Image (cartoon, rainbow, N blue to C red):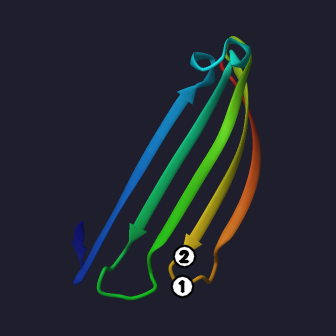
């Protein structure tokens, strides 16, 4: 945790990917992603923590170019400001 101006906060982030072709050759080029972020800026204050979940799947169209679809869920401890969003990303490496 960190301490600033009398506050004691803490948090963590976990990220992982898995290529799906290891399960089935038909899934060559597909990768699943998952991420969890948890942050509490002040453990002594109730209802100020937040958690973000991101999950998605990408497909490599051609070498260096992929498309990614993911869902991002942001949840606050108090419930106010919680959101769920869906995204499509195109990544091109050159």
- Quadrant of the snapshot with the C terminus: top right
Q: Name the residue under label 2.
A: 76
Assign a secondary structure to mark 1: loop
Residue 59's place in the image compared with 72, above or below, is: above
Q: Which of 86 and 64 is in front in this view?
A: 86
Quadrant location of the N terminus? Answer: bottom left
Residue 50 image point, x, y percent: 49, 71
From the viewer's perspective, is 33 left or right of 47?
right
Q: Say left or right for 68 vs 48.
A: right
Q: Residues within 10 Å of mark 1 (few under 14, many from 20)?
A: few
- Check disc 1 and report the residue beneath it: 78
The local secondary structure at tag 2 comes to strand
Q: Distance between the residues labelled 1 and 2?
A: 5 Å
Mark 2 Cα within 10 Å, few/some/many (few <14, many 20+)? some
* Residue at 46% over, 57% down: 37
Q: In the rendering, at what x and y percent does residue 90 appear?
A: 75, 32
Contact (Cβ within 8 Å) of mark 1 with mark 2 = yes
Image x and y of residue 61, in percent = 77, 18
Q: Which of these two is toward me, 5 or 48?
A: 48
Total count of labels: 2
Horizontally, is 16 left or right of 56 in the view? left
Which disc, if any, is residue 4? none
Q: Quadrant of residue 84?
A: bottom right
């Amino acid at each position: 945790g960190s301490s600033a101006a009398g506050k004691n906060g803490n948090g963590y982030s976990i990220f992982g990917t898995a290529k799906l072709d290891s399960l089935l050759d038909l899934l060559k080029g597909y990768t699943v992603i998952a991420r969890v972020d948890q942050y509490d800026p002040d453990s002594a204050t109730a209802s100020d923590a937040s958690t973000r979940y991101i999950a998605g799947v990408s497909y490599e169209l051609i070498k260096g170019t992929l498309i990614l679809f993911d869902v991002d869920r942001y949840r606050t401890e108090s419930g106010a400001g919680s959101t769920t969003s869906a995204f499509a990303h195109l990544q091109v490496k050159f």
